[in-house]
Amino acid sequence: MNKAFANLALTIAATLALLTSCIEDTGNHMTVITYPQGYAIVYADQTLDSIFYETTEAHRVVPVVGWIEIDDTPIRSVRYVDNVLYELALPVIFQPNTTGKTRVGNVSINAGEYTAATAFLQTRFLNVERPYRYVSTDYSKDSLVTVTDSAFVLADSIVFTAYGNWTLTPKHGTWLQPQTTAGTPGRHTVMLALESNATLYNRTDTIVLESNGVAESIPVLQLGHRGSN
């Protein structure tokens, strides 16, 4: 495990310790983060999430890395218990992750004598559901399964969620074409049109998915006539 992910483990442990100390306080003082509890995972092109918390104190929400910002305009704000306890949710804004590496950023709530902390893990990859992706437990390594078709299969599909406007571009485009090449944020199923492969040889192409400046290559393999038998 590399240094970044070792730091993540320490952050999570420290966060849980801080939250426990706040909850067990015998006075009328409390600061607790209800989301993310420990850490949240966001994708490379994802630019928005949120932090939910409760506190009895005047406070500041502070990111400790440059690629995370906090919008101080609450998306949820509730006061109760004689106007003493505040329940809030603030937008958390991310820069797209174009570094090629999964990264971790911490956010802390400084509330008087109390501090609570959480973390956001931003992957290096996009949210591709099909083909399947293998990911290591610490998110430091991942790989997409190759989309594989027999010689005379003429259609397949990929499924993904994009958090920005997106494009799909085949690297070669001679025998493989996506039916939709651009779109808006959301979950999408895109059909792939293939020409039949009458040769004896396998052939490969790559479809490049790009969203918010983050690009990922999706490998496609079509078997030759012999390999399809």
Image (cartoon, grey):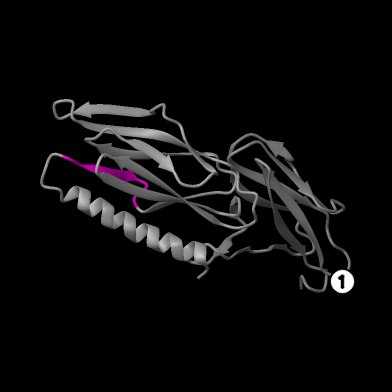
Residue reaching furthest to the left? 26
Q: Is residue 210 left or right of residue 132?
A: right
- Residue at the location (58% across, 41% down)? 95
Q: Is 127 in front, or is 57?
A: 57
Residue type at mark 1 is Leu
- Residue at the location (35% across, 49% down)? 117
Q: Is residue 31 shown in magenta?
A: yes
Q: Which residue is mark 1?
A: 200
The quarter in which the C terminus is drawn is bottom right
Decide: is 69 above or below 196. above
Q: Position of residue 132 (x, y in %)?
A: 59, 60
Q: Position of residue 136 (x, y in %)?
A: 52, 67
Highlighted magenta segment, given as a residue range: 29-37
Q: Is 207 in front, or is 77?
A: 77
**Label 1 SS:** loop
Q: Quadrant of residue 70?
A: top left
